[in-house]
């Protein structure tokens, strides 16, 4: 399974990558900006996307809206510190499949990734 991590923080990308690796996922791609992430989606056709909200050049919400505007139904998890109810509703309305609030522990992210795999029948 191909997974794209779109997150401005190199440290957070490394943390997420390590959790995914521990889960057995090794086909992982990274992007530091929303624009770079959109380009990677076209190049690698990920089976799942984990994105942050705050990224330069194109924020995570705009990135999600761009994915959905192109009729891509790839499962997307928003991994962000935006915890306010309005933000969660806005992200889900834009097409986010799952939402994880930072900071999180490895067990929480593992559980949410597994839920996405089960819910969306990701191979």
Image: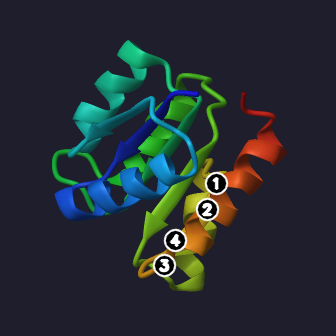
Please say if the residues under marks 1 and 4 sit with CB atoms less than 8 Å apart. no
Residue visible at 56% across and 79% down? 86
Alpha-carbon span between mark 1 and mark 2 = 5 Å
Quarter containing the C terminus: top right
Q: Which residue is mark 4?
A: 106
- Secondary structure beneath label 4: helix
Q: Which residue is mark 2?
A: 110
Q: Nearer the viewer, residue 72 or 105?
A: 105
Please say if the residues under marks 3 and 4 sit with CB atoms less than 8 Å apart. yes
From the top left corner, tell me how far across and down residue 35 is, in percent.
Answer: 24, 35
- Secondary structure beneath label 1: helix
Q: What label does residue 113 carry, if any? A: 1
3 or 1: tag closer to the N-terminus: 3
Number of marks: 4
- Secondary structure beneath label 2: helix
Alpha-carbon span between mark 1 and mark 4 = 11 Å
Query: Which quadrant of the structure image shows residue 115?
Result: bottom right
Please say if the residues under marks 3 and 1 sit with CB atoms less than 8 Å apart. no
Q: Where 122 falls versus 80 (above or below)?
A: above
Please say if the residues under marks 2 and 4 sit with CB atoms less than 8 Å apart. yes
Q: What label does residue 104 carry, if any? A: 3
């Amino acid at each position: 399974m191909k997974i794209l991590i779109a997150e401005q923080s190199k440290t957070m990308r490394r943390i997420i990558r390590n959790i995914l690796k521990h889960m057995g996922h090794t086909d992982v791609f990274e992007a530091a900006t929303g624009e770079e992430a959109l380009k990677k989606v076209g190049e690698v056709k990920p089976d799942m996307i984990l994105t942050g909200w705050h990224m330069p050049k194109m924020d995570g919400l705009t990135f999600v809206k761009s994915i959905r505007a192109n009729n891509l139904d790839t499962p997307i998890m928003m991994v962000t510190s935006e915890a306010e109810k309005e933000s969660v509703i806005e992200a889900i309305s834009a097409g986010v499949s799952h939402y994880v609030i930072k900071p999180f522990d490895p067990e929480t992210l593992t559980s949410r990734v597994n839920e996405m795999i089960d819910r969306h029948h990701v191979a």
